[in-house]
Amino acid sequence: MTTTNHFGDWVEIIERGDCGFTYVRFYADAPKWVRNEAINRFGRGTVFLPPRQNRVAGRVAA
């Protein structure tokens, strides 16, 4: 499995805002490298929303 697939498994939601910001919400149990990957992908305008839940085992990212 590639890093891209792993990243998507930890993301609960990604939304692009009107002012160029990207809002990202990870699952509560996401590892720290996922946050760094989001910054690398979306740049300085990345806003991290607080997690709501843990990732459900066996969930497939859309």
Image (cartoon, grey):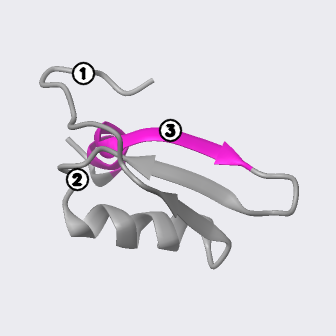
Q: Name the mark nearer the viewer: 3 or 1.
A: 3
> Is 19 above or below relative to 11?
below
| Amino acid at the residue labelled 1 | Arg
Judged from the image, the secondary structure of the residue bearing numbered disc 1 is loop
Q: Is residue 10 left or right of residue 15?
A: left
Q: Earlier in the sequence, mark 3 or mark 2?
A: 3
State yes or no: residue 57 in magenta: no
Q: Earlier in the sequence, mark 1 or mark 2?
A: 2
Category of crowding for the residue at label 1, using alpha-carbon neighbours closer than 10 angstroms: few (below 14), some (14–19), many (at least 20) = few
- What label does residue 13 carry, if any? 3
Label pair 1/2, CB-CB below 8 angstroms: no
Q: Earlier in the sequence, mark 3 or mark 1?
A: 3
**Residue drawn where x is 37% and y is 66% of the image:** 35
Q: Position of residue 1 (x, y in %)?
A: 19, 41
Q: Position of residue 2 (x, y in %)?
A: 26, 47
Task: Identify the magenta region.
Answer: 4-16
- What label does residue 30 carry, if any? 2
| Amino acid at the residue labelled 2 | Ala
